[in-house]
Amino acid sequence: MMKEQLPAAAAHSTQRAFTLVELLISVVVVTVIIFMVAQLMSNATTLTRASSKHIDTDTQARVVFDRIALDFTQMLKRTDVDCFVKQASVNYPGHSAGHGKGNHATSGQQLNDQIAVFSQGPGYYPSGAQSPVSLVAYRVNASPSLPSYLRLERMGKGLLWNGVSNLTNLNNPNTVYPIVFLPQTIIGIANAGKMWSDAVNNPSNATSEDSSYETIGPGVFRFEYYYLLKDGSLTDTPWNISTDPHTSITGIGLTKVQAIAVSIAVIDPASRSLVPVSSLFDLASDMEDFQTPHGHSPVNNGTGVVEAQWNQAVTDAISAGQTYEGSPFPAAAASAIRIYTRYFDLRTY
């Protein structure tokens, strides 16, 4: 009897078939590859998002510092005109986001600093016309009812040259006033009425908001400055209180100061939207003021102390799950906060 032969095509097809085990292995391999690719894409997205947030804060810090640099360069560096800066003998009037003195002379957190100087840069009259000289001021807004709350603001108030009539209505915040020479002071004019009031005040309500302020750092919620003196020391007063007999800047201005160091804490817009303003205020309160260092040890030399303490406050909010107002500070938002410091040279003073 002859044996039946299978067609060649059928025999070939039978030899190439996959077993069930092989199919299962293939599915597992493909699944693993897809998972690895998805993980890589997720990590890349996370890194891109973090980089984008840092780009936002870097850009904002650059804009703020460039503007401050221009204002300090154009500042009237004279001993016969006043400037409103923190010093041992001056209390900040008003609320100013919770502080009373910028030099930490009292116990507890003092929070954001303020500064006001005369500048040769242009300012604006209430009419909108430009002025060749202006009163420039910086502060972090302290009015919770305003959209600019906990945001860095800059004032550029147009002034008249001294020598013109100053018989103006001090109770009108829109009155154009001339630049003043000592013994008149910025705070003296401000306290005489509403004129220049917000240059030296930072009330916790919006009853006397000056329209000359504009938000320059929408993500800047902490603003601190201190002085590098010409003798090499870092202080919170514009002279060396241990060696100089001065009690105020009247008559000496900032002649003892080599540079002003400005530190800011910045959060990007996306992260800020995740944080309740009360929690952001509490985090800012954990960022301590600069204090004049004592002794000569590296720990107390002042350099980098502010930045280190502020970064530690941010780190605590990230890793320790710091709780503010009963809710944890979002770690993703805290990780996007960055601290910056720049020194602005006043050597031409």
Image: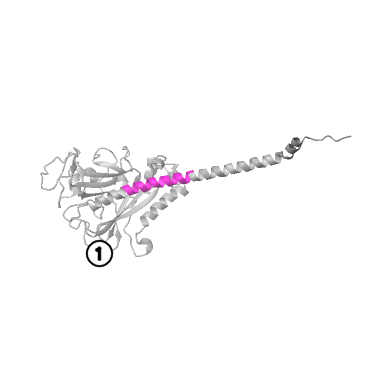
Number of residue marks: 1
Q: Main secondary structure of the magenta part?
A: helix
Residue 55 magenta-highlighted: yes
Residue 216's x, y, as percent? 30, 44
Q: Amino acid at mark 1?
A: Thr
With 55 as the anchor, is 73 left or right in this view? left
Is residue 49 visible in this depiction of the protein? yes
Q: Which residue is mark 1?
A: 243
Q: Where does the image place residue 162, in percent across and percent down from the top left?
A: 13, 48
Q: Please tell me how crowded label 1 is: few (under 14), some (14-19), or many (20+) other residues with Cα within 10 Å.
A: few
Query: What percent of the width, then of the height, locates residue 80?
Result: 16, 54
Q: Which of the two residues, 216 or 129, is positioned nearer the viewer here?
A: 129
Q: Quadrant of the C terminus?
A: bottom left
Tell me which residue sits at (59%, 43%) in the image: 33
What residue range appears in magenta?
Answer: 45-63
Residue 108 locus on image (x, y percent): 34, 51
Q: Quadrant of residue 270?
A: top left
